[in-house]
Image (tube, grey):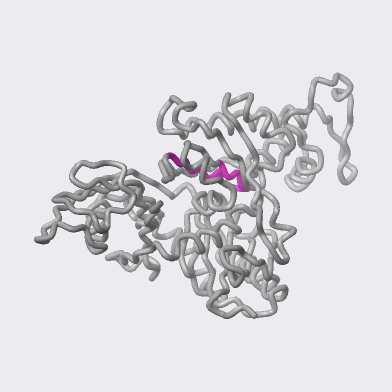
Amino acid sequence: MSTKKSRIAAIDVGTTKVCTIMADTATGNSLRILGVGVVPSRGLQKGLVVNFEEAKQSIRESVRKAEQSANYKLDSAYVGITGRHISSVNNRGVIAITRNDRMVHPSDLKRVLDVARSVKAPGEQEVLHIIPRTYAVDGQEGVKNPVGMHGFRLDVETHIISAAVTSVKNLTKCIRGIGVDIDDLVLEPLASAEAVLTEEEKAKGVMLADIGGGTTDIAVFKDNSIYHTSVLPVAGYQLTHDVSVGLNLSFELAESMKKKYGNVMPGDDTAADDTTITTDGHSASYRDLSDIIRMRMEELLRLIVLELPQGDYARLIPAGLVLTGGGANLPGIAELGREVTRLPVRIGIPTSLYGVSDVLSDPAYATAVGLLLWKMRNEGNIQTWRPTSPVSNLAGKVFKFFS
């Protein structure tokens, strides 16, 4: 029988869907899924709340479905956050070790991280994550855990992620408004990475692109630590919009046709040029649909690799590009990705789940599953740092990625 302490939950509030997962960790390091609630999203656009009441109602319905499946009430959850308002920067911090024994203590990590986070954030933004990438003791680089080492100087290189205060408040207000507390806010591509990337890929260098409904969330890993994060305001919604305009269909029909017939690599079969596809009594050319989808996905893939902080892609990310999110379900997208980027490309799917988890073995649920894994894998390596300004009554988290 699982205890309340072992129960964890995640809420992924997306532009097209809200997914709530309730699980427990009673089986050790694996997740047993107890309840899943997936409903269409309303009141959100590009990761932002644009209609408070509609967004709150969508979240409430998703939580209620998960609770019915799990047969207990959800009290708190880990919540994903994304949007164009997200910004990130790499910054260094340096302190002197002043004790007589010159030994690095855990309190020194807190001090050096406080120095690193002193970088000026964009206006009206608050720090969401401070992630130490690597430490140096007296110039010795590449230290993962300096506690217990001796030295006069401690350096840290960090990746700092900030979010707009108003966007955070609107999202947290929606969730707390239905009686659910928030354990932590996690940047969505960091969560997705937990669900679909391997340790080997993170060590070699890999890029994750989570193609959702309203945004494409990006995370680059190198040497087992986060290297770069960003959010593109281009994703599945824009693709459906282009199909709608190009084929003179309503948005709903265009979305249905995209999901039913969409293929970015339809092949060179000339017979396909004459194929007519039909949805709800409306017809269109299969070749026209494929051409629109292919052109837009080519553009998105080029935008994704342009987010890399340096031009030598093969050297920075030899493990290539991992595509996940609902947009990664388009047939042929991995092949197109390899053609456009000249990099290894694969589709990232959450695996090794137990319980009522069949629906979750899909790229569309990488973020929701990853939120649970983020909690499991980082819980023991968290130091809490509270912001000086009362942004959302949430503690900022400092995550130590120690090997």
Q: Main structural element of the magenta stretch: helix, strand or loop?
A: strand
In the image, 244 versus 379, the foreground residue is 379
Kindly identify the residue that appears in the image at 64 percent across and 52 percent down: 350
Compared to residue 104, the image places residue 316 above or below, namely: above
In the rendering, at what x and y percent does residue 194 appear? 54, 52
Kindly identify the residue that appears in the image at 55 percent across and 33 percent down: 320
Residue 259 magenta: no
Compared to residue 165, the image places residue 330 above or below, namely: above
In the rendering, at what x and y percent does residue 222 appear? 43, 39
In the rendering, at what x and y percent does residue 250 appear? 76, 44
In the image, 261 versus 317, the foreground residue is 317
33 lies left or right of 205 = right
In the rendering, at what x and y percent does residue 173 appear? 49, 69
Residue 220 magenta: yes
- Which region of the structure is painted magenta? 209-222
338 lies left or right of 374 = right
Residue 42 sits in quarter = bottom right
Residue 1 sits in quarter = bottom right
Total count of labels: 0
Kindly identify the residue that appears in the image at 61 percent across and 47 percent down: 212
Compared to residue 249, the image places residue 400 above or below, namely: below
In the image, 26 versus 196, the foreground residue is 26
Residue 51 sits in quarter = bottom right
Kindly identify the residue that appears in the image at 30 percent across and 50 percent down: 121
